[in-house]
Image: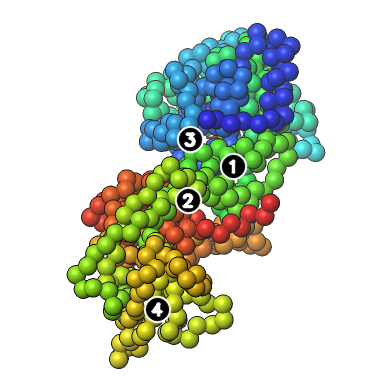
Amino acid sequence: DIQTGTNFIRQIVEEDIHNGKNQGQVVTRFPPEPNGYLHIGHAKSICLNFGLAYDFNGTCHLRFDDTNPVKEEQRYIDSIQQDVHWLGFDWQDHLYFASDYFDRLYEFALSLIQMGKAYVCSLSPEEIRQYRGTLTEPGQESPYRARTVQENLDLFQRMAAGEFAEGEHVLRAKIDMASPNLNMRDPVIYRIMNQAHHRTGDTWHIYPTYDFAHGLSDSIEGITHSVCTLEFEDHRPLYDWFLDQLGVHHPQQIEFARLNLNYTVMSKRKLLQLVEQEYVEGWDDPRMPTISGLRRRGFTPRSIRDFCERIGVAKANSMVDMALLEHCLREDLNKRAPRVMVVLDPVKVVITNYPEDQVEHMEAENNPEDPSTGSRQLPFSREIYIERSDFREDPPKKYFRLAPGREVRLKHAYYITCDKAVYDDKTGDLVELHCTYDPETRGGWSEDGRKVKGTLHWVDAQQAVPAQVRLYDRLFTAPVPGSGEGREFLDDINPESLRVLDTCLLEPGLEKAAPETHFQFLRHGYYCVDQSSTPDTPVFNKTVALRDTWAK
Ligand code: ATP
Ligand code: MG
Ligand code: MG
């Protein structure tokens, strides 16, 4: 049930189809570099690219942009595939690797050399930078620009054969050192890297740069619309130049604004830092904005797709409020998450007028938003637990929960009245509450229609299941981490982003729920089963509170 609205990119594609461009075909691609896990920003690009293919009966390729062997790893390739599938998208048999094109890219480079459009430059990296000039000053031509085709072919082939050290030579496109666009000032297209590649092993000693590899990979795959983020707008003339010089299939590059989300960071470099310096427990820590972190936190694929649809696709950068993402999640979970009772900070209640050995079962609806989900039976007996914060010796105004002499409703069960609070002599801590119940109020209502304002959740003392519950808050305290004067993003880490509760009590049966199952803990919020959970030691993660802070 992929749902897509309109946006300026869809309009371009629609027009192209209308005009018979590319024989009316639509081929897009999602091209991650396997140097980290996917994050919510990538989800925007995934929804857009796969969404276009879905809408226009086209195909969307998953292409690993694996041209930089230093930072790339197989485990990233695996996680990326898993995450794209989890989001609900499928590349079918269109899985590609830019590294599979290394031979062809090399041939393209040889062609450019033969046409006199590329040369081997032997300036040092530092000199290349100096020669490039600035926005206000034209660049200076490299003395090696005058090398003959023969000389260039010979040197380039020897670069490929591994005869030189890193940094000794590069291959550059011969374009225009006076171009106002810095990207056009003889950009580097191949550099020497004496590095093994995770797929091609020791075959190569030279690797193509992004600008060279990306557009030509698009071309090789017959991509029609190459959708990328705004920072590549300045690279488009270069993207076009390579394709034009080589006279190959020419996809259209279209740029859109990347997703920026407040209270988090999305650069893979920063995310890697959080993992490596152990600010979080891994890439899939529930506080991470990664797809796997969001999944573990309890986000659903539908809520993320809905979010990506609502933020839209625009040409201008902007900041999106985290509260919108949470709003989309609540909307989905409200419809689908079963309601259950869990006491996070328990205090015992003894119902003194309830028969000692009696156990009865109360019917509890699973989800009032979806009656088809039916109901379950909850055990109830003389001793139960309620939330410690649901009792006050001296209740303030508007506190409608339990207090001495006060009557409240136990959800799905009976009305109870508090007769006595028992405190520990030494510590003064509340030990237990003694209450009486009204047998005439079974199911949680009374025929005389008397008013009870408070409704409390509870669990049966004998059958409740102990569990750990992890409460998460935002990972950063600042809307834009590190944006303050002289601050680094790590300075804005929220020191209280994780609180672990070890004495929680679940209603029986919940301990058997599979990892990633979603629930609404009544009166608390949405929670899900952590991947480490077992029936013997259940662990739940807080996904999001009930209260919606999104201002429409
Ligand atoms: P980073 O800067 O964090 O390393 P990246 O853009 O280099 O991210 P890639 O793996 O190259 O990461 O990204 C794959 C695709 O996802 C690219 O087409 C890129 O434009 C897109 N993408 C990455 N981040 C965002 C974002 N925040 N919003 C939208 N699209 C994004
Ligand atoms: Mg990239
Ligand atoms: Mg990157």
Q: How many marks?
A: 4
Q: Left or right: 239 with respect to 496?
A: right
Task: List x then y, in percent, for residue 237.
Answer: 72, 24
Report how far apart the C-alphas of labels 3 and 2 lie in the structure: 27 Å
Q: Does ligand 1 reach within 8 Å of label 1's beta carbon?
A: no
Residue designated by label 2: 368
Look at the numbered disc 2 and give the secondary structure of its residue.
loop
Residues at badges 2 and 4 in contact (C-beta under 8 Å)?
no
Residue type pointed to by label 3: Leu
Question: Looking at the rendered structure, which numbered label has been put on residue 417?
Answer: 4
Residue type pointed to by label 4: Thr
Report how far apart the C-alphas of labels 2 and 4 lie in the structure: 27 Å
Q: Left or right: 95 with respect to 219?
A: left
The picture quadrant for ligand 1 comes to: top right
Residue designated by label 3: 87
Q: Mark 2 or mark 3, which is nearer the start of the sequence?
A: 3
Foreground label between 3 and 2: 2
Residue type pointed to by label 1: Phe
Q: Mark 1 or mark 3, which is nearer the start of the sequence?
A: 3
Report how far apart the C-alphas of labels 1 and 4 lie in the structure: 45 Å
